[in-house]
């Protein structure tokens, strides 16, 4: 089917070539005002100024949608989530509000192990149905591509269960979905005194089973004091690479312990979180080929310092923005809030934030050839806004729902 969209007030993120944006290039959001967009079989076929329409689309299709001066931009590309989980954890949230420390919550069986216990008891169908509802909500909020991690299983069976749920989501959802194996999220209680034994389980049992069923695209490790050391991360990622799983890593959330250096050595696609960065960490990641993925809603929810976005951009880093949607540290997958927080709290410019949440997010999932910008040949994954006066109004008017409609592969889903 061919669809023509006319009278777009601003078509944002139009790119003839697709490049990872770093440093000053992040501030350029190529846009066309008074635009049209032509979609053929779910893909972007042409776009331009309204005055070029007759020339570029001599034969108008039957199906024409008048955008009535709405803004249109690429759907969000959320490159870091833990979307599959069994239960929310608001009881921990209340405990924390009352003053409980992370250690006290962990001692009561809270945190990642709490989610793992609940996931163990859940069926694959339950997990799928709940994740599907979350995915529908995120689609309404403008997300068109998403990465989803395992990591609340922590046993062979439960990690496979999580990854099979993600596989089913991939098969049934129109969204572009990437799957990441995060068996190394924390050490299960029974391996508390035998960390090496759990790493062996990941390498000897989990990875071969995951590879046999083709359940993951990437491998992730939570590199943090009290969790996995940089050396352990290297061991696990090298084993993953044997099966073609490239690293996308949790580093520098709470401490700077050498995760950045190790991640660069592993040619990580992305290194994510980055709340706690030394000057050297900033210099190293900025000079590397890895994308730094900032997760401001996690910093917000945990009352951590926000990521040093300005310093990273000024040092020439390629940065992406993602939601980290998970029940412990970011119980929201709202990319509009992520974009707003990155401007309000990290002083990113609206154009930088939108680029980081679209094209660079697509790069952080290796989906840049199919999504993340308005480009001929890419999927028509689009956000149509309510009437807004400018692109800067999106992060400025944070908290308002400014999305009117969302199109995925050429069809309105919302
Ligand atoms: O990305 N930091 C590690 N993992 C998650 C949170 C895990 C949880 O508390 O459930 C994160 O923030
Ligand atoms: Fe995370």
Image: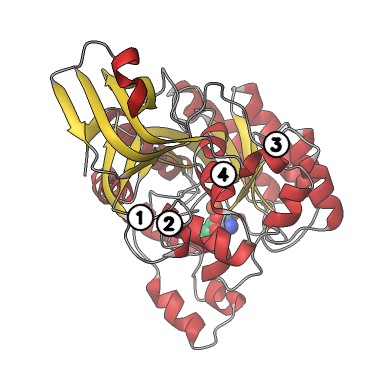
Mark 1 or mark 3: name the one nearer the start of the chain: 3
Q: From the top left corner, tell me how far across and down residue 81 is, in percent.
A: 47, 48
Residue depicted at x 47% and y 31%? 373
Which label was assigned to residue 394? 2
Q: Residue furthest front?
A: 51
In the image, is residue 211 above or below residue 387?
A: above
Mark 4 or mark 3: name the one nearer the start of the chain: 3
| Residues at marks 2 and 3 touching, judged by CB atoms closer than 8 Å | no
Q: From the top left corner, tell me how far across and down residue 93 is, in percent.
A: 45, 76
| Colouring rule applied to residues | secondary structure
Cα separation between marks 2 and 4: 15 Å
Residue occupied by mark 1: 388
The quadrant in which residue 163 appears is top left
* Pair 2/3: label in front: 2
Residue occupied by mark 4: 356
**Category of crowding for the residue at label 4, using alpha-carbon neighbours closer than 10 angstroms: few (below 14), some (14–19), many (at least 20):** many
| Residues at marks 2 and 4 touching, judged by CB atoms closer than 8 Å | no
Ligand 2 within 8 Å of disc 2? The answer is: no
Mark 1 or mark 2: name the one nearer the start of the chain: 1
Residue occupied by mark 3: 290
Mark 2 or mark 3: name the one nearer the start of the chain: 3
Cα separation between marks 2 and 3: 28 Å
Q: From the top left corner, tell me how far across and down residue 49 is, in percent.
A: 38, 28
* Pair 2/4: label in front: 2
The quadrant in which residue 226 appears is bottom right
Cα separation between marks 1 and 3: 35 Å
The quadrant in which residue 374 appears is top left
In the visual, does 285 lie left or right of 87?
right
Ligand 2 within 8 Å of disc 3? The answer is: no
**Category of crowding for the residue at label 1, using alpha-carbon neighbours closer than 10 angstroms: few (below 14), some (14–19), many (at least 20):** some
Residue depicted at x 63% and y 61%? 347
């Amino acid at each position: 089917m061919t669809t023509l969209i006319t009278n777009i007030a601003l078509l944002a993120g139009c790119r003839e070539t697709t490049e990872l944006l770093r440093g000053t290039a992040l501030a350029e959001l190529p846009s066309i005002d008074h635009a049209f967009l032509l979609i053929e079989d779910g893909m972007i076929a042409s776009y331009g100024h309204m005055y070029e329409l007759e020339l570029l689309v001599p034969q108008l299709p039957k199906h024409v949608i008048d955008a009535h001066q709405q803004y249109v931009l690429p759907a969000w590309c959320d490159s870091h989530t833990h979307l599959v989980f069994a239960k929310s954890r608001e009881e921990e949230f209340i405990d924390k509000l009352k003053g409980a420390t992370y250690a006290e919550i962990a001692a009561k069986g809270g945190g990642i192990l709490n989610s793992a216990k609940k996931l163990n008891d859940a069926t694959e169908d339950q997990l799928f149905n709940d994740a599907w509802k979350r995915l529908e909500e995120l689609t309404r909020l403008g997300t068109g591509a998403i990465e989803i991690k395992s990591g609340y299983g922590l046993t062979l069976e439960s990690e496979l269960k999580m990854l099979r749920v993600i596989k089913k989501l991939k098969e049934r959802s129109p969204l572009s979905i990437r799957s990441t194996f995060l068996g190394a999220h924390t050490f299960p209680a029974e391996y508390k005194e035998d960390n090496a034994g759990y790493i062996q389980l990941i390498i000897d049992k989990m990875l071969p089973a995951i590879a046999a069923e083709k359940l993951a695209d990437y491998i992730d490790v939570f590199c943090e004091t009290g969790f996995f050391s940089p050396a352990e991360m290297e061991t696990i990622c090298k084993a993953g690479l044997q099966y073609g799983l490239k690293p996308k890593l949790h580093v520098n959330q709470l401490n700077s312990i050498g995760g950045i250096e190790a991640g660069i050595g592993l040619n990580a696609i992305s290194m994510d979180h980055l709340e706690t960065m030394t000057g050297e960490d900033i210099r190293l990641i900025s000079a590397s080929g890895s994308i730094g993925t900032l997760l401001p809603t996690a910093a917000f929810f945990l009352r951590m310092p926000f990521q040093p976005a300005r310093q990273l951009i000024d040092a020439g880093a390629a940065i992406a923005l993602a939601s980290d949607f998970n029940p412990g540290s970011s119980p929201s997958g709202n990319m509009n809030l992520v974009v707003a927080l990155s401007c309000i709290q990290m002083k990113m410019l609206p154009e930088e934030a939108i680029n980081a949440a679209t094209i660079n997010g697509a790069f952080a999932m290796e989906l840049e050839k199919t999504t993340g910008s308005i480009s001929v040949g890419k999927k028509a994954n689009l956000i149509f806004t309510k009437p807004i006066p400018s692109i800067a109004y999106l992060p400025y008017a944070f908290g308002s729902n400014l999305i009117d409609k969302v199109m995925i592969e050429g069809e309105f889903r919302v």
